[in-house]
Image (cartoon, coloured by chain):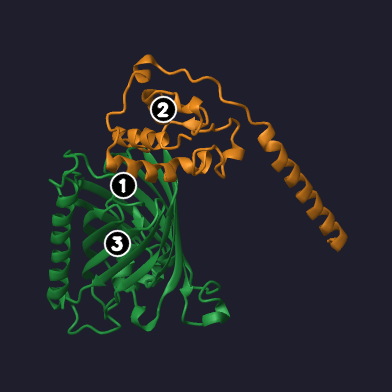
Chain colours: A orange, B green
């Protein structure tokens, strides 16, 4: 068996580093903005029945940290550690545009979802806990 | 001593109930408490958490060697040859009912598990506790000669059944007490076929995703069910104490801990643990779980 020289090893390492670096720079550029959400009317009109509930605010923070933070970031800016690997930008929850969505629309996006933003109704089966997340997202307004 | 422990547990649970009644006046509802535990496993023990229906879970439980046997020379057990591992899968068929299967390196066990969470603690505190039953049937997979000259296939079987009573006292604190019965179809002459055990386990959350875990499993020495004239170190199992750190994400749970027993299956822990945590017999271990929803 041929011995691998030190030069070959260094060359291979440099190649891997180069490809890795290029990929890291390329990934964010290929991300696209999400298409407009198509949300059934019955959801659009839904109001959050648990606004101001202290238990839900604590639960919302806990659930956000567990299920959402890795993509959406700790402040909802869309800068979580997994965000760069997504094909679609995760959006910025602090913007006026995002906060203009109705409670029901945010509920639909969270519970039903689409594509990479998978619905969480299976992992979070209690709808009050989905509303808790909606309440928590409201606190991210700038 | 046993009376003292029982009295202590009773006081803890009753006082906790009173405390919780005072804090849940904000909104009365009879929904089950959310997320009583972060994971279905707590080091070596089961919790009363059951994943949502149609959830598949993959579990890897690993145990290195004793930290105090060779010290730094085998990097506190990390290089030790006696490591144990269990790889398993669980599937939650309907809400509260989970079935599982796994293989364990020690004794080449194949095990079949079932857990049923049949009572849920409610937010209104009308039901102050969660209760579950857990059963584990294992087949020792070693060669026939291990079981002596009069080998029969059923000699390989061992059984474990457990009642688990838990309570989420606050968002940061969950405790559970357990009572268990273990039976091995075949044991060596100086040992008992049966054991009754109790345990107390807990989770202390200090951030939305992180918590401290502890467990203490005590195999009781009850002369009434013993086949031996007295209990000795050779014929009885020692308590299993463990503590660790858990981090939880959407689909994963990761636990890293120190624990006493080298067996990962509960019947092995209650029946065959000769490590003594009071003498520093601990092992580093970790558990990784992954959940998929269908």
Marker count (numbered): 3
**Alpha carbon separation for disc pair 2 and 1:** 22 Å
Give x and y (percent) for residue B261: 37, 71
User: In what element is the residue under mark 1?
Assistant: loop
Q: Is mark 2 on a helix, strand or loop?
A: helix
Chain-order first, disc 3 or disc 1: 1
Estimate the x, y position of residue A104 in percent, counting from the top left.
36, 24
Question: Do discs 2 and 1 belong to a common subunit?
Answer: no
The residue that mark 2 highlights is A106
Instruction: Tell me the residue that label 1 is attached to.
Output: B35
Q: Residue B238 or B236: which is nearer the viewer?
A: B238
Q: Are marks 2 and 3 in contact (CB under 8 Å)?
A: no
Front residue (pair B12, B191) = B12
In which quadrant of the rendered view does residue A45 lie?
top left
Q: Residue at x 35, y 37 (%)?
A: A124
Distance between mark 3 and mark 1 Cα atoms: 14 Å
Whole-number angstrom distance, CA of label 2 to CA of label 3: 35 Å
The chain to which mark 2 is attached is A
Residue to which mark 3 is pinned: B202
The front one of B112 and A82 is A82
Q: Looking at the image, which residue is at 24% across and 47% down?
A: B116
Q: From the viewer's perspective, is residue B227 above or below residue B56?
A: below
């Amino acid at each position: 068996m041929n011995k691998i020289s030190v030069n070959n090893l260094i060359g291979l390492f440099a190649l891997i580093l180069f490809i890795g670096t290029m990929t890291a720079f390329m990934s964010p550029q290929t991300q696209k903005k999400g298409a407009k959400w198509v949300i059934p009317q019955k959801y659009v009109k839904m109001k959050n029945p648990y606004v101001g509930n202290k238990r839900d605010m604590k639960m919302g923070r806990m659930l956000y940290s567990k299920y959402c933070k890795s993509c959406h970031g700790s402040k909802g800016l869309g800068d979580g550690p997994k965000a760069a690997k997504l094909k679609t930008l995760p959006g910025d929850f602090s913007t006026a545009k995002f906060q203009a969505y109705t409670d029901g629309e945010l509920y639909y996006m969270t519970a039903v979802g689409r594509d990479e933003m998978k619905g969480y109704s299976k992992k979070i089966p209690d709808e009050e806990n989905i509303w808790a997340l909606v309440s928590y997202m409201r606190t991210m307004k700038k | 001593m046993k009376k003292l422990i029982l009295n202590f547990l009773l006081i803890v649970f009753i006082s906790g109930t009173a405390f919780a009644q005072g804090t849940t006046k904000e909104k009365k509802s009879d929904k089950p408490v959310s997320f009583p535990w972060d994971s279905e496993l707590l080091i070596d023990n089961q919790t009363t958490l059951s994943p949502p229906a149609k959830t598949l879970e993959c579990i890897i439980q690993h145990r290195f060697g004793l930290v105090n046997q060779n010290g730094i020379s085998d990097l506190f057990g990390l290089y030790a040859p006696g490591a144990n591992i269990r790889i398993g899968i669980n599937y939650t068929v309907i809400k509260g009912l989970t079935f599982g299967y796994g293989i364990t390196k020690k004794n080449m066990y194949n095990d079949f598990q079932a857990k049923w969470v049949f009572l849920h603690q409610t937010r209104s505190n009308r039901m102050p506790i969660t209760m579950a039953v857990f059963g584990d049937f294992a087949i020792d997979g070693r060669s026939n000669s291990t079981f002596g000259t009069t080998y029969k296939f059923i000699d390989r079987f061992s059984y474990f059944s457990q009642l688990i009573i838990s309570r989420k006292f606050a968002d940061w604190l969950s405790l559970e007490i357990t009572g268990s019965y273990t039976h091995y179809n075949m044991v060596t002459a100086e040992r008992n076929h049966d054991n009754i055990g109790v345990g107390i386990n807990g989770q202390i959350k200090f951030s939305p995703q992180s918590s401290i875990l502890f467990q203490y499993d005590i195999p009781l020495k009850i002369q009434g069910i013993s086949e031996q004239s007295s209990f000795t170190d050779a014929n009885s199992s020692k308590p299993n104490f463990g503590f660790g750190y858990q981090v939880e994400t959407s689909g994963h749970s990761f636990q890293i801990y120190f624990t006493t027993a080298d067996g990962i299956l509960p019947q092995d822990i209650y029946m065959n643990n000769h490590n003594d945590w009071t003498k520093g017999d601990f092992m580093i271990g970790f558990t990784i779980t992954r959940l998929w929803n269908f």
